[in-house]
Image (cartoon, grey):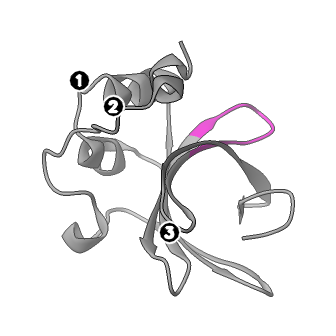
Amino acid sequence: MMNDYSFLIDGKKIYSEKTLVYYDLPLLFVCYDNENNKYLALCTDSDELSYILVMTSPERIIDMLDQKISMDCIFKESTHKWRVKSENSGDIVKIVNSFEDDELPEKGALFSLVDVSNKQYLK
């Protein structure tokens, strides 16, 4: 990832806002851009620093945190999707129409980490 921002997508700097799952590095996290659009990023390969990223809404993120929708739903239903590989020289970004099943959270899996800060996030 880059210095003061997480990704560079279509010329927009995408900043990390809230880490939801962390294990040696952020694995699932919410991002935003300068227009305050929200994104959800998922690390799919921590060795290669590969991610899938979708533009979403604060309401969809809250629904995921409240277990009203599954984690894979956000990634499948978004109309703006990217694959990102972070490298020292910059991000390699690909616009995609869909993700492979093995990139996504388990089908139907609900967000279940109990963290008070996650419950208060965006509310």
Question: Given contact means CB atoms under 8 Å apart, are the residues at marks 1 and 3 in contact?
Answer: no
**Label 3 amino acid?**
Tyr
At 14% from the left and 53% from the top, the residue drawn is: 107
Q: Which mark is residue 51?
A: 3
Tags 2 and 1 touching, CB below 8 Å = yes
Which residue is rendered at x = 79% and y = 69% of the image?
2
Q: Is residue 104 left or right of residue 3?
A: left
Who's the residue at 41% across and 46% down the image? Answer: 79
The residue where tag 1 is placed is 68
Q: Residue at the right extreme?
A: 4
Could you say where residue 92 lies in the image, as x and y percent from the top left?
64, 80
- Element marked by disc 3: strand
Image quadrant occupied by the N terminus: bottom right
- SS of the residue under disc 2: helix
Q: How many residues crowd mark 2 within 10 Å: few (<14), some (14–19), many (20+)?
A: many
Amino acid found under the numbered disc labelled 2:
Met
Camera sees residue 30? yes
Dot 1 falls on a residue whose secondary structure is loop
For the magenta stretch, what is the residue range? 30-38
Residue 45 inside the magenta-drawn segment? no
In the displayed structure image, the side of residue 100 where residue 91 appears, left or right: right
Relative image position of residue 72 (x, y in whole percent): 26, 49
The residue that mark 2 highlights is: 64
Which corner quadrant of the image does residue 91 belong to? bottom right
Q: Residue at x 78, y 54 (%)?
A: 12
Location of residue 39 with respect to 58 vertically, above or below? below
